[in-house]
Structures are given as C-alpha cells and as structure tokens.
Amino acid sequence: MRLERFARSAVLLSVLVVVIGLAVSTAVAQTLAHGQRSAAEDQLKQRSALVAEAVSTETMRYVDALRITAAAATVEPLTAARFAQVAEPLREMGLAGATSLGFQVAVSDDQVISVQETWRSRGAADLTFSPVGTGRPHIFSVFSVPLDGGPPAVVGTDTSQIPAPLEAMTQARETDQVTVSDAYQLLRDPGMRAHRQQLAFILTAPIFEHSDNGDRGDFVGWVLMGLRSQDFIGATLERVAQDLVDVTLLAQNFNDELVTVATQRAQTQGVRDLRYNIDITVAQRRWRLDIEAAGGALPGVNTGFPVAAALSGAVLSLLLAGLVYVLATGRSRAQIQVREATSQLRKTEAAARRQADLLEAVMVSISEGVSVIGSNGGVLLHNPAAKRILGVGDTVSDPRAWHTHFGIYRPDGATPFPVEEQPLVRALDGEPSDNVEMVIRNASHPSGVRIEVSGRPLDPKARQHGAVAVFRDVTVQRAQEAELAAFAGVVAHDLRTPLAVVAGYAEFMTEVIESESIDPEDLHTALDNITIGVQRMRDLIQNLLAYATARDAPLDPAAIDLGPIAAEVISTHTARLRGTCPDLVPAVTLEPMPKVLADPTMVRQLLDNLVGNAVKYTELARPAEVEISARPDRPGWIRVEVSDRGVGIPAGQHRAIFSGFHRAHSGQQYSGTGLGLAICQRIVDRHGGVIGAVDNPGGGSRFSFTLPVADRVMAVTG
Ligand code: ADP
C-alpha cells in the first residue's frame, strides 16, 4: 500500500516536472521562434529594400537613357538618319528587354497628308499613315529602330487606339517627363507562343522643339522605348533576389489595377511564410514589389531551431521526470527496504525472544536442575530447579570453591567430592559423564540432598566454550529403593515363618498318617496351625496390597460423613468378637463425627486399622474400651482421635510404630504384620494431614489424625 502511494506521488511529481518542462520548453521555443521570425522579417525588409533599390536604379537607367535620347533628338531637326543616330547609343547599351526605339507624332485629321509628306521628306520615304477613326488626333509611328536585333517595326500605324501607350504619351507630353505606360500585350507578340508571351510597356519621353531662350518649344512628338517586362527587369530581380526570395513586380495601371510585370521565384523550398511589399516610383508610376520568402531559408534564420529547442526541452523534461521518478521511487523503495528489513529484524527478534521464553519456560517447568557455566567456571545459567536442589546462590565462580560453597560430598555423605571428578569440571575439559551421584549438604539442606549429575561440554554451535550439567534430586528415590530392599527382606522373612509352620505341620501330618497311629487331636492341632500359618500369609499379602494401594492408588476425594463409616467399622469388629468371644465385645463410644473431604475407601481403611489395633492391643481377657471423637484442628482441618485403654505403646516407639513392619508388641499374643500403621501413615500423608500416637492419660494409647473438612463451618463449630 505504501509503495503504491509512493509510486503515485512519484508519478504525480514526474508529471508535474514534465508539464513544467514542456511549458518552459514551449515558452522558450515560442520566444526563439518569435526572435527568429523578427530576424527573418528584418532580413526580408532589408532584402526588400535592396530589391527596391536595385529595381529603382535599373529603371532609372532606362529612364535616363530615354531622356538623354529625347534631348539628343531635339538638338537638330529630326530626320530618319538623325533618329537612327540617336538610337545607336541605346542599342549599344544593350538594355535588357528593350525591343525598339520609336518616334511618334500626333496628327489631326486634316494634317495627315501634310505631316506624312513632311516626314517622308525627312527620310521616311515609305511612310504611309494609316489613320483609324476621326475626330481625335491620330498618333502615327514615324521612325522605328529595333534594339533587340529583331526586324524593324511597321511604321505609319495609328496607335491612338491603344489606350496604354496613349495615356502614357499624353501624361508625358503634359508633364514633359519620361512616363511609363500601363503594362499591355505587345502588338507584335500575339503570334508568339503562350509561354513566351509577356507583358510589355513603353517608356515615352516628349520632344519639344529646341529654343535658344531655354523655353519649351513646340511639341514635336514622342520617343518611345518598347520594353518586355520580364526581360527588362527579370535579370535585375534574379540578381537581387539571390535565389532566396520570391519577387513579384506589379505595376499600377491608370485604373488602379495591379498587373504583374515580372516575377522571380527562388529555388528554395518551403512555405512562403514571410511577406513584404514595397512601393517604388518608376517614371511617374507607382509600382509595387511583393517579396515573399520561406523564413527558414533566409541565411542566419533557422526556423527549425525553436522546434529543436522545444523538442530538446521536451526530451530533457522527460529525462528529468524519469530521473525524478527514479529518485522519488528509489528513495521510497529504499525506505520500504529499510522497513522490510526492520520488520524482518523484529520478526527475528520476536522469534528469538519466543525461543528464549520457551527455553526459560522449559527451564522453569522441568524438575531437573540445569546449570551452565562458562569457560572460566562462572555460572551462566541456573534454572529454578537447580537453585532449589542446590539450596544456595551461585555467587562462587571458581570450581575449587564449589565444595565449600554448595557442600558437595561423595555418596557416603561425608567425603568431600574431589573437584577434578565433578561432572562440570570434567565437561569443561571436554569429558562427558553420566549419572554421577553425590550429596549436597549445606545450610539449606542440613540433612543432605542426594543428587545424580550428568555433565556435557557445551555444543560448539552455542559459540561459547563451557559446560552444562543436568541433575536431579534422587533422595526420595534412593529412600524408596532402600525401603523396597528392606521391605523385600522383611516380606521374605515374614512369609518364611508361616511357610515354615505350614511346611512343618504338613510334614508332621504326613508322618502321622504313615505311622498309622493316627491321633485325630494331633491332626486337628496340625491343621489348625496350618490354617493359622495360611491366614498369616493371607493377612500379610492383603496388608502388602493395602500398603501398595495406599501409596499408588489414585486419590478420589469426596465430601463424606465420618460418622456412618466409623459406626460400620465398629460394628464389624464388635460383631466378629460377639460371635467368637462374647465376653470380649469392646465398649466403643462414638462421638459425633464431621464431614471430611477425603477418599472414602482409604478413610475406611484408616479407621479400620486404628479401631482394629485399639481392640487388639488390650490386656488379655479384658474387653477393649474405645472412644472415637473429633475436634477442630488448624483452620479447615479436623482432628479425629481413637483412644483406648489397652496395653499402651512402649516408650520411645510412638513414632517408629508408623514405619513398615515395625512391631512394638511381638509374640504370639498379638498377631500382626506391622504394616497397619504404615498404611495409616500413607493414607493421612496423601490427604495432607498428620498422624501420631501418644499415651492416653489414665492408660492406653491415643492415636490421632487430621483430615480436611468438607464444610468449614462444621470444622469450626466442631
Ligand atoms: P500390627 O500388625 O503389628 O498390628 P501395626 O502397624 O498395626 O501392626 O502396629 C504396629 C505396632 O504398633 C503393633 O505391633 C503394636 O506394637 C503397636 N500398636 C498398634 N496399635 C496399638 C495400640 N492401640 N496400643 C498399643 N500398641 C499398639
């Protein structure tokens, strides 16, 4: 999501850069284009001025030439020879486009013949005027000299009908100035092929008779120079246009119509986007020059430059935008990579923490002690079980001081454990050891704790040199093992006695039967003794079972009323004696009993054993007196007492009688296995209570045990 946001921002930024870049590029390009255009326009203006100057100069050359010719024609009376003479310089000048030089006169209707005669006499021998129309002066050509090498023009024709020359001649005569006519189609050209036809015009100058006083004399006629427009000015235009501009020369006719006189088109390609026109005055007429050019073709002007600048700007903008995008997203990518790395680190850290927590949880929950030491013997780790088993803190790091600090002894509990044999010290040297037994005895464990230790060098993967030891408290296990061994011995011994009895009497009976002197009494006695022996074995086995059950059977506590259970136990014992020895039926007092939270089967076994002993351990032939009562003990507990007036417990054995197979009264008088009270001890232990025996004041014994009450109120009120 964040990457997308960064990418969006980067794209926006890049677009912004592109937009600004394009805007700036466009503005620069426009400015450049504007500059280029103004430069081009300036150049076009300059070129136009040059063209105008050249055209003016060139036309002026023709005008001057004609004026001089006209002036020359007045110096002497004009004859054909004289005219040819004055025309000669013009011919030699080789004026481009000049076709002929003519002389024309104005003649009224009534003077046609006389004037014709006059000019015939002046050298135009074949002159024949051909008047057209009447009422208006005729204008006849008198002399004509070709200037372009062509054939001489026909003379005598009436040109007064051709408007263009007529108007020019009229104006020239009125103004005494060289005048140019409108452009018109030459009379001699209509037969030409279309592409060779071109407009023509004439330059005309009036001739007045020479007067000595300097005034203008009588009007004689006109000299006229015929000019082909394109030929006349084309070369000039070509020269000044320099193949850079298109030039069109337009003449303004009398009717203000603009007529194209000559054109020069440059070879350059491109759209003619620049235009300029300039007016010039040629022989009293306004002509116009239209100049066009393709801006880019002009020297020093590069119309592609602004485009190139704009394109370069655009490309640069795109590159810049790309760079911005790369930088922007690069930064965000770097940030994201850092974030991902950080989150990976956090995950790794969390996983490591979980591992550490798990390890700690394992260390806390296991009952085995675990100690890890570094290469110098300093303790790196002691789990709670290790602390509990060792009993003292781990402030000592020198292995040589461990013995005195922790109190480490050989299994005999007296010999100090040699430092070099200690599993951790051996493990530091790379030597593993298993199940080494030792005794820890110190202020916390004055009676000593028996432990079993295994040591290993630390796994090299831990990247730390050191050793680890795992140890467990085997005190109880060893005690149980010892007890089991003793138990087995006692059981073997106790079973051997009745077995020997049974075997002896069985042998005796065999002998009696074989001797054939059978005394039924002896057989009875033997059988009775066998039965007693078997009974003893059965009792022993039963008690052994009960003893094992009291330790191993699952505890199933429930709220039970002790009264009925005690009453049933009492009733069992009294009923048994009532059947066999009615005189020995015990006197039992049962006081109110509370409800307790206990396993009913076990509690029944407990009361049965105590009541049974109270009935059993009495003076011979004296009925037992038993009292069962209950009173509150510590909060939540009840103390049940079973008191008797029997033989009592021999001094110093009040505690020992609760050990298995310990019998304070042995002999034939009191049969037993020595397991009853041991069973009671286990049952009470498993309920969390205490059991004990004291002398009953006034004789006999008083056994008491505590059990948790089912109802606290009852326990308090008793
Ligand atoms: P036993 O099978 O011998 O009765 P117990 O474990 O029940 O084994 O008792 C152990 C010993 O404690 C008995 O042998 C006896 O010496 C003594 N003892 C038990 N109960 C009484 C009692 N009520 N009065 C006197 N001594 C008793």
Image (spheres, grey):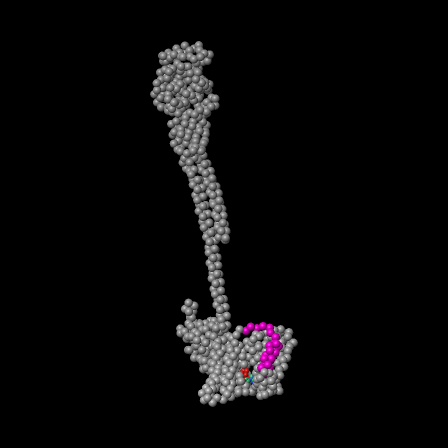
Q: Residue at x 47, y 55 (%)?
A: 336
Q: Residue most toward the right?
A: 717
* Residue 450 relative to residue 119: left or right: right
As rendered, which of 440 and 219 lies closer to the eye? Answer: 440
Q: Is residue 446 visible?
A: no
Provide the residue span drawn in magenta: 555-577
- Split into 4 quadrants, where in the image is the C terminus? bottom right
Q: Residue at x 39, y 10 (%)?
A: 117
Q: Is residue 710 above or below residue 412?
A: above
**Residue 5: x %, y % from top left:** 50, 51
Residue 571 part of the magenta-drawn span: yes
Q: Is residue 593 visible?
A: yes
Q: Residue most toward the front?
A: 516
Location of ligand 1 given as a quarter of the image: bottom right
Q: Residue at x 61, y 75 (%)?
A: 561
Residue 639 part of the magenta-drawn span: no
**Residue 400: x %, y % from top left:** 44, 78
Q: How many marks?
A: 0
**Residue 593: x %, y % from top left:** 62, 77
Q: Is residue 497 above or below residue 52?
A: below
Q: Is residue 269 above or below residue 563?
A: above
* Residue 277 relative to residue 632: left or right: left
Query: Which SS does the magenta portion mostly show?
Result: helix
As rendered, which of 470 and 46 lies closer to the eye? Answer: 470
